[in-house]
């Protein structure tokens, strides 16, 4: 809060015409504006009407009328701050935009000294006409110490007893949430039985997932699969296990001179375990898994996409330690370096992501996956962006045996002893892990439909004969992909 307050004061003193405060917490924004106004009059427009110093002057007043009145009486703007809320209500009104631009120009040329416009919104939607006059301030996430204070205040207000070590644990769980969101979740947990205990942790975690999902950009993924669910890929698994030791002991590792782990890029054939490794890595590290949907970053208004990227990065860093999973990375930055509006936005997004990846010092460990690196910007593949780049090939015979064992063991553990894994592996050269899982599912379904008591090797081989392998379907493209991985000196995830 201290940092954003200092920035706010600096922008106001420098005469920035429009300051865009991007926050979900209007109460906190109001307190911040009052603290930096320095005795100035605070005028506000929102859906309820027009206010002066929190006193309602005109109910349900159209913003256009308010702006025209203020422009006609410039003396009323001396030593004042005009706060605008409920942006979606006026962002497409061109007359309102033109009036705001007129005021912004007058602030810029010194005609309206000691006057600023502040827009408060949880969205970043900036009409292009206002872009030259506007700067964005992003709300800061609460620190762990701040969160402990929120929990302690809640306990005091609600007369709830909570052990200090449990408060510390909750503070870690609440990282990335606002004060309002934390209080709401605590109140929900308290409403069940009048106390907050470890039995409420699953409820708290579920509520946090919903809050993260409401960001529209990040999704918190449940942790089910672990390293034992991955057939093969021993080199990649060993590498992740080494990083896990660093990740869990970061303070000691840093004192020893070890750099903060950045992340890993896993490229390779579809259906061969790339996404599974992202999930297993989070479970191995013992941290939340956040999936970044790059497609949701793109916005309609100037600066909206870049703001969404910063918001996603900020939330991941606030929740850290975590694993940030970016699936199909090559699609996210397709068009980088091209010309035109969409390509320009993609290039700026790429620059923001690249800078963060290069300079980040938080425990947000990136696991990026890609199917086709040929379309990927070469800057992303340079040494130092990721800690390592692995490629995942089609599983070899031993890996196929392991994959069959995993999927049969999950569904029909009592049948596993009677299955000839060597025969299955020998007959499935060129099959991906996903192909093998599909074969096992089909054979179990067929056995059930026939009224059989167990699955057999012959039954599974029958399903194999009816399944086209990935190698058969994508032979030419797979050869090109593997050749490119070897040419780029990517590390084999299996070797």
Image: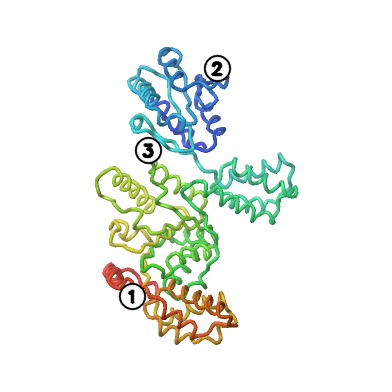
Q: Position of residue 237 (x, y in %)?
A: 45, 71
Looking at the image, tell me whether mark 2 or mark 1 is earlier in sequence order: 2
Q: Are marks 1 and 3 in contact (CB under 8 Å)?
A: no
Residue 391's place in the image compared with 57, above or below, is below
What crowding class fits label 3: few (fewer than 14 Cα within 10 Å), some (14-19), or many (20 or more)? some
What crowding class fits label 2: few (fewer than 14 Cα within 10 Å), some (14-19), or many (20 or more)? some
Please state, as top left, top right, bottom left or bottom right, where the C terminus lies in the image.
bottom left
**Secondary structure beneath disc 2?**
strand
The disc label shown at residue 121, or none: none
Q: Position of residue 398 (x, y in %)?
A: 43, 82
Residue marked by disc 2 = 57
Q: Alpha carbon of mark 1 to alpha carbon of mark 3: how far?
A: 45 Å
Residue closest to the eye, 420 or 13: 420
What crowding class fits label 1: few (fewer than 14 Cα within 10 Å), some (14-19), or many (20 or more)? few
Q: Nearer the viewer, mark 1 or mark 3?
A: 1
Residue marked by disc 3 = 301
25 to the left or right of 18: right
Q: Residue at x 26, y 50 (%)?
A: 337
Q: Alpha carbon of mark 3 to alpha carbon of mark 2: how far?
A: 32 Å
Residue closest to the eye, 464 or 212: 464
The disc label shown at residue 472, or none: 1
């Amino acid at each position: 809060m201290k940092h954003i307050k200092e920035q706010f004061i600096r922008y106001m003193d420098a005469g920035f015409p429009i300051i865009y405060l991007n926050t979900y917490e209007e109460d906190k924004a109001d307190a911040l504006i009052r603290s930096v106004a320095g005795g100035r009059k605070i005028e506000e427009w929102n859906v309820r009407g027009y206010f002066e110093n929190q006193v309602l002057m005109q109910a349900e007043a159209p913003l256009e009328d308010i702006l025209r009145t203020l422009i006609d009486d410039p003396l009323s703007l001396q030593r004042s701050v005009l706060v605008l809320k409920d942006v979606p209500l006026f962002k497409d009104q061109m007359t309102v935009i033109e009036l705001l631009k007129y005021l912004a120009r007058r602030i810029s040329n010194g005609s309206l000294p000691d006057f600023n416009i502040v827009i408060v919104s949880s969205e970043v939607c900036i009409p292009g006409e206002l872009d030259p006059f506007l700067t964005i301030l992003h709300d800061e996430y609460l620190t762990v110490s701040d969160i402990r204070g929120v929990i302690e205040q809640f306990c005091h207000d609600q007369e709830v007893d909570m052990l200090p070590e449990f408060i510390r644990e909750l503070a870690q769980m609440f990282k990335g949430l606002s004060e309002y969101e934390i209080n709401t979740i605590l109140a929900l947990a308290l409403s069940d039985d009048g106390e907050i205990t470890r039995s409420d942790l699953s409820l708290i975690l579920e509520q946090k997932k919903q809050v993260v999902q409401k960001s529209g950009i990040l999704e918190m993924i449940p942790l089910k699969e672990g390293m034992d669910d991955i057939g093969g890929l021993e080199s990649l698994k060993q590498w992740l296990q080494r990083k896990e030791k660093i990740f869990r002991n970061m303070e000691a590792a840093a004192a020893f001179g070890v750099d903060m782990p950045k992340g890993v890029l896993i490229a390779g054939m579809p259906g061969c375990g790339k996404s599974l490794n992202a999930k297993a890595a989070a479970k191995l590290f013992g941290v939340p898994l956040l999936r970044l949907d790059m497609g949701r970053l793109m916005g309609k208004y100037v600066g909206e996409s870049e703001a969404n990227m910063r918001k996603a990065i900020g939330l991941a860093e606030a929740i850290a330690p975590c694993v940030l999973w970016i699936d199909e990375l090559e699609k996210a930055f397709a068009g980088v370096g091209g010309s035109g509006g969409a390509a320009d936005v993609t290039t700026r997004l790429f620059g923001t992501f690249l800078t963060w990846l290069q300079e980040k010092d938080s425990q947000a460990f990136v696991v990026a996956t890609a199917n086709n690196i040929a379309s990927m910007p070469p800057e992303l593949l340079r040494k130092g962006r990721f800690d390592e780049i692995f490629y995942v090939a089609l599983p070899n015979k031993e890996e196929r045996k392991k994959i069959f064992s995993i999927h049969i063991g999950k569904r029909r553990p009592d049948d596993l002893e009677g299955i000839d894994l060597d025969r299955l592996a020998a007959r499935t050269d060129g099959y991906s892990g996903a192909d093998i899982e599909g074969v096992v599912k089909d054979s179990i379904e067929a056995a059930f439909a026939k009224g059989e008591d167990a699955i057999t090797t012959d039954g599974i081989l029958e399903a194999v004969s009816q399944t086209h392998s990935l190698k058969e379907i994508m032979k030419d493209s797979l050869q090109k992909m593997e050749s490119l991985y070897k040419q780029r000196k990517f590390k084999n995830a299996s070797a």
